[in-house]
Image: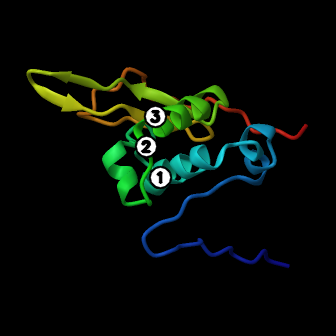
Amino acid sequence: MAKKKRERVTTRGGFLALPKLLMESRDFRELSPSALKVLLVLGSQYRGWNNGDLAATHSMMKDWGGMAEGTLSKALKELQERNLITKTRDNRRGREGARCALYALTWERIDDCPGKDLDVPPSIVPKRKLSQG
């Protein structure tokens, strides 16, 4: 008997896949509400080919109900400490202008992001290995 062909799941505008093994991890389940919100902001930008070019700035958070700069900074630090995101580029202010810090979701591989001047090279495998136990 022939196998049924599985249809590709598509959602208009894209979607963020949160693997069940990730959601069952202590790192994810014990996130503060602010860190979870920031993770969703970062995830909403992921298109399947731009991991490493995700940002969460104070001005961006205004569209998500707002967040104090100190709270945003603590949330980003928490996400990094729990190995849910990794910083791919530092923020900078200078004569040439300002640029925001960029991040990647650790359960996805880091993509090549031309023109973004990332401090981290593209990867073949994700930084975070998802496994049971």
> What's the residue type where badge 2 is placed?
Ala
Circles 2 and 3: CB distance less than 8 Å? yes
What is the CA distance from the residue labelled 2 to the residue labelled 3?
5 Å
Mark 2 or mark 1: which comes first in sequence?
A: 1
Give the labeled residue for mark 3.
Answer: 70
Give the labeled residue for mark 2.
Answer: 68
Q: Position of residue 110 (x, y in %)?
A: 48, 34
Q: Position of residue 84 (x, y in %)?
A: 62, 36
Give the labeled residue for mark 1.
Answer: 41
Compared with residue 70, is residue 39 higher up or lower down, i.e. above or below? below
Tag 1 secondary structure: helix
Check disc 3: other Cα within 10 Å, few if <14, some if 14-19, many if 20+. few
> What's the residue type where badge 1 is placed?
Val
Circles 1 and 3: CB distance less than 8 Å? no
Tag 3 secondary structure: helix
Tag 2 secondary structure: loop
